[in-house]
Image: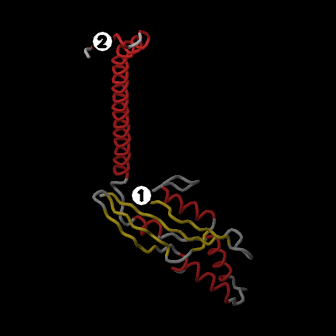
Amino acid sequence: MDISTILKNIPLNRLLIYLVTLGVLPILLLFFFFFGKVDELDDVENSIQNLKLFAFEKEKKQSVNKAVRSHFSEADHFYIDKNLENLRFLLPEIENLEEIIRNPHFTEDEGVRKRLEFLTSPQNKLRFTESGVQSTAYFQEVIETLAHPVEVNSTDLKQILSLVEGIEIDTYKPLEGRPQLIILDFKLDKKSGGQNNDVFELNMKLLKREFQ
């Protein structure tokens, strides 16, 4: 049976449907192909945009890192030893106790002498112990933990925070040679009773980072 005979046996309305379908099919295929390519182009464009954003963020981060390294490039390795561990605290109370003891009418009071000995001893000075040393190609960092708590007043706290944070607080100004110091832990407990209404017990932990 040849093709002409087959076509004659197909009803006209069905034949028209077949012809229309055959005519539309290439257009549909072209349509799907076109939009498939458009989706691919969108994906490529999104990838390019994401890559640009990633490159921008990386460059921005590197710029910040360079600025930080530059800022702390002249840091003093012994900054903590020189400027924090040499501080004396509760000076008004020390002066008051010394005046009491110098008074010729002072009756021996073991509590007064013990208090003065404590305030002027290394027990009430900042003493940091180092641990967790880590080094990279760009910096070295170490955890500085107080060996024991110290007693301070609000004025002492301002001085400590000014030295640690590198900012001006009241009359205290930042000093040169400060390495990057980050407070990891800061615990402050208020002492109660007697003359210690403005006295706090301080414990703290720092991260010291020095750039190569």
Residue 6 vertical position relative to residue 49 in the rendered view, above or below: above
* In this picture, residue 179 sits left or right of residue 190: left
Q: Which residue is mark 2?
A: 5
Q: Which residue is mark 1?
A: 180
Q: State the image coordinates of residue 211 (x, y, percent, origin top left).
A: 33, 57
| Amino acid residing under circle 2 | Thr
Mark in the foreground, 2 or 1: 2
Quadrant that contains the N terminus: top left
Q: Nearer the viewer, residue 158 or 129?
A: 129
Q: Spatial distance from mark 2 to mark 1, Cα to Cα?
A: 94 Å
Q: Nearer the viewer, residue 79 or 117?
A: 79
Bin the neighbour count of mark 2 within 10 Å (Cα to Cα): few under 14, some 14-19, many 20 and up: few
Name the residue rendered at 34%, 51% in the picture. 69
Mark 1 secondary-structure assignment: strand
Quadrant that contains the C terminus: bottom left
Specify the quadrant of the image occupied by residue 199. bottom right
Q: Nearer the viewer, residue 112 or 198?
A: 198
